[in-house]
């Protein structure tokens, strides 16, 4: 898009505004295709490669750490799901084993909700 250069006051105002902005930020002038600001462009070459590589390595480390955390969380979830499944499929000392034969209703409740998962007894009782 060419910069307006007519005789109207608005055209002069726009040209002055663009010149002021490009003088303050020569990258903007380069993006707009104005070559008179090329000499004012900053030299980005010293240390740029090392900074880019350092940022890439840091991002790679963050991604790897995120994958490790996710894998650990999934492992813990699988372990807890396995423990819950095993507890649900084995006789428990906290539930009535045979409600109809003991004369109790078939909807017997556990003795205590805190006893439903007793980690010490799970670890102590070998199966």
Image (spheres, grey):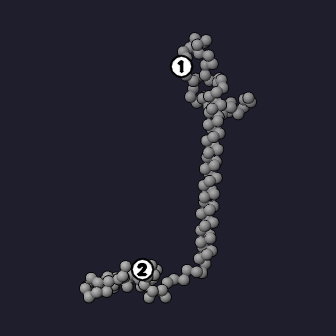
In the image, residue 51 sits, relative to residue 60, either above or below, namely below
One can see residue 42 in this view: yes
Q: Residue 87, how many percent across, how many down?
A: 64, 29
Residue at image location 61% in from the left, 37% down from the top? 81
The residue labelled by disc 1 is 107
Q: Position of residue 38 (x, y in %)?
A: 48, 86
Q: Nearer the viewer, residue 6 or 45?
A: 6
Which residue is tagged 2? 32
The image shows residue 21, relative to residue 82, as above or below, that is: below
Q: Mark 2 packing: few (<14 Cα in 10 Å), some, or many (20+)? A: some
> Label 1: how many residues lie within 10 Å, few (<14), some (14-19) or many (20+)?
few
Q: Quadrant of the C terminus?
A: top right
* Residue under the image location 58 percent in, 13 percent down: 100
SS assignment at label 1: loop
* In front of the other: 12 or 95: 12
Image coords of residue 97 (percent x, y) = 63, 19
Q: Is residue 25 visible?
A: no
Q: Is residue 83 left or right of residue 39?
A: right
Circle 2: element type = loop
Distance, label 1 to label 2, CA atoms, is 78 Å
Above or below residue 86? Residue 72 is below
Q: Are marks 1 and 2 in contact (CB under 8 Å)?
A: no
Going from the N terminus, do you reach mark 1 or mark 2 first?
Answer: 2
């Amino acid at each position: 898009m060419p910069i307006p250069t007519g005789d109207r006051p608005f055209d002069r105002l726009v040209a002055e505004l663009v010149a002021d902005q490009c003088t303050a930020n020569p990258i903007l002038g380069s993006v707009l295709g104005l070559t008179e600001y090329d000499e004012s462009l900053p030299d980005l070459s010293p240390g740029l490669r090392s900074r880019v590589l350092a940022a890439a390595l840091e991002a790679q480390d963050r991604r790897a750490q995120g994958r490790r955390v996710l894998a650990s969380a999934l492992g813990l979830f699988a372990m807890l799901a396995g423990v819950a499944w095993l507890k649900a499929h084995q006789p428990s000392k906290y539930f009535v084993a045979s409600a109809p034969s003991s004369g109790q209703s078939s909807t017997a409740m556990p003795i205590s909700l805190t006893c439903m998962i007793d980690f010490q007894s799970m670890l102590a009782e070998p199966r």
